[in-house]
Image (cartoon, rainbow, N blue to C red):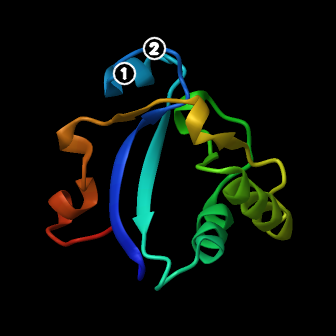
Amino acid sequence: MDGIVSSSVGYTGGQAKNPTYESVCRGDGHTEAVRLVFDPKVITYEQLMAKVVGQASTHKTKAQYMSAVWANSPEQAEVLQRVAASENKAALPILSADETKWYDAEEYHQKYVEKSMGRRRY
């Protein structure tokens, strides 16, 4: 996607320290997540979140697969609330990145599609 500088996958939202894919699958409370770094000169936060929220599911599911967005500031949370309302997804959890720890997923999960298909994707 234009404007995405980098991405990584990881785990967040749970209480267990140093989660692994196996512990997340067993239900340790973490969510499999994607961290995006973007260039605001190319895509605004609101434009990016419109794409993210537009693809999110508001159906309740186990923590491992839940759709949620972690905001880095109150301003981002406000944008997210507005975007979620406009997408009829007001039920989408908007959480504070400051209140949860991020753990990078194992290396074999990073750029999984790129590795398995031989092309670069964010």
Drawn side of residue 84 relative to residue 69, left or right: right
- Residue at 42%, 79% (x, y): give it: 3
Q: Is residue 23 above or below residue 86?
A: above
Any mark on residue 19, and which? 1
Task: Please state the horizontal and vertical placement of residue 90, each as a whole percent of the image.
Answer: 84, 54
Measured in 3D between alpha carbons, the distance from the residue under mark 2 to the one under mark 1, in whole angstroms, is: 6 Å
Q: Amino acid at mark 1?
A: Pro
- Residue at 46%, 85% (x, y): give it: 42
Drawn side of residue 99 relative to residue 91, left or right: left
Residue 76 picture quarter: bottom right
Any mark on residue 16, and which? 2
Question: Around disc 1, counting alpha carbons within 10 Å, would you say few (fewer than 14), some (14 to 19), or many (20 or more)?
Answer: many
Any mark on residue 61, and which? none
Count numbered badges in the picture: 2
Residue 6 picture quarter: bottom left
Task: Please state the horizontal and vertical placement of residue 47, each as a whole percent of the image.
Answer: 62, 77
Between 36 and 28, the one nearer to me in the picture: 36
The secondary structure type at the circle numbered 1 is: loop
Task: Please state the horizontal and vertical placement of residue 98, each as a whole percent of the image.
Answer: 57, 36
Task: Please state the horizontal and vertical placement of residue 19, each as a whole percent of the image.
Answer: 37, 21
Q: Amino acid at mark 2?
A: Ala
- Residue at 53%, 22% (x, y): give it: 14
Looking at the rendered image, the quarter that the N terminus falls into is bottom left
The reply to whether callout 2 and callout 1 are in contact (CB within 8 Å) is yes
Looking at the rendered image, the quarter that the C terminus falls into is bottom left
